[in-house]
Image (cartoon, grey):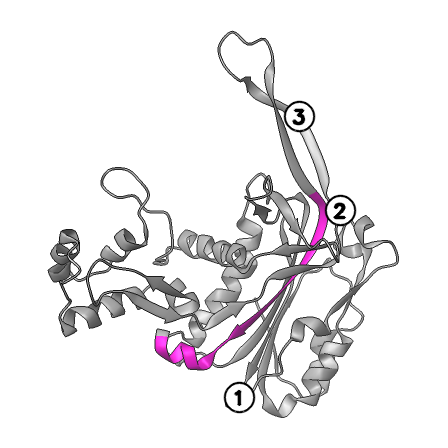
Amino acid sequence: MSTAKRSEIVFLYDITWGNPNGDPNDANKPRIDEETGLNIVTDVRLKRTIRDELIARGYEVLVRDTLIEDGFLADAKHRGIDFLPESAKAKAAKKNEKDKLTQEELEAFKKNVKNCVDIRMFGCVLPSDIKNASLQFTGPVQFKMGTSMHPVKLEYVKGTGAFSSGDKKDQKTFRQEYFLPYSLINFYGLVNDRAAEITGLTNEDVVLLLQSMWDGTKNLITRTKAGQTPRFLIQVVYKTKDFYIGSLDKKIKFSFTMSGEAVRAVRDGTLQLNELKDCLVDYKEHIDKVVIKLDSEVITDINVEKELEKAGVTVEVMA
């Protein structure tokens, strides 16, 4: 398996009457930029979606909810102990910061952690009570904050709960929630080939990343996320060392004739891909291939697959 090549990723998905990423410091409201009215989704939310799909597929993932012996959730230090070689676990139990791993134990620990696919993708900061056992890997896969491609409208919904607030009450509790009627969200990511050499990220891992991002978005069936739908994904893989175009997400537009807050479906507008196509054609000598997946509901200004192929760019349609 070969080390992952440098590439750029743009991923679009939408949600209807849901909350793509609530802010716990603001009544769990969807995050909205007050200046532009755009919906904001953190990269952490997207990484969690990917990790949940990886777990469902049976892959070893380091960042996940695990319990320790007393039934409480494990913190990062306890989770790290799971990956120590057996000869070193007694040192962790002592919580003596003077204890150190042998060189063999340290290498085995690093290898065990890198066996977790999410660490090969996103890196980690893993503290330890053992003096030389704290690990830090910079993730080869990095995403910016996702933003909606149009201004959104925040709706406040109030209703009654299923139960009363206590004994001898004759009324049910009230609940309040905040939803977005619609949001088409644009995420930009970059695969760093240099960091990939350190964590061991492979080209096969990146294929798994794209699949988990697409399918994980569909499979995130919770009350506030049900109905999320992946709409468009493009990965530009480079063959020229230390080269990438950058900011490909800015070369995709979503045009609509109504107000942005009135958009209620992906078919209410047109995805403008011509600028992106022109950019990729201009730099085609640096591009190894372009991977594309497009949902059938999306209206586009051009057939980007055919236009790129016509211009001599190698295109691979993701299954």
Q: How far apart are marks 1 and 3 (CA)?
A: 55 Å
Q: Mark 3 points at which residue?
A: 159
Instruction: Say which quarter of the image contains residue 170.
Output: top right
Compare residues 263 and 211 and report the one nearer the observer: 263
| Residue sitting at x 13%, y 62% | 99
The residue mark sitting in front, 1 or 3, is 3
x and y, in percent, of residue 212 in the image: 50, 60
Circle on res. 189:
none
Q: Name the residue under label 1.
A: 239
Q: Mark 2 points at which residue?
A: 153
| Residue sitting at x 34%, y 68% | 136
Q: Which of marks 1 and 3 is nearer the N terminus?
A: 3
Question: Looking at the image, do the residues carrying marks 1 and 2 touch, with CB atoms under 8 Å apart?
Answer: no
x and y, in percent, of residue 67 in the image: 30, 43
Q: Is residue 167 magenta?
A: no
Q: How dense is the environment of label 2, judged by Cα within 10 Å: few (below 14), some, or many (20 and up)?
A: some
Q: How far apart are marks 1 and 2 (CA)?
A: 42 Å
In the image, the segment drawn in magenta is: 180-198
Question: Looking at the image, do the residues carrying marks 1 and 3 touch, with CB atoms under 8 Å apart?
Answer: no
Q: How dense is the environment of label 1, judged by Cα within 10 Å: few (below 14), some, or many (20 and up)?
A: some
| Left or right: residue 13 compared with residue 165 | right
Three-letter residue code for mark 2? Lys
Q: How far apart are marks 2 and 3 (CA)?
A: 19 Å
Instruction: Say which quarter of the image contains residue 285.
Output: bottom right
Q: Quadrant of the C terminus?
A: bottom right
| Residue sitting at x 60%, y 12% | 171
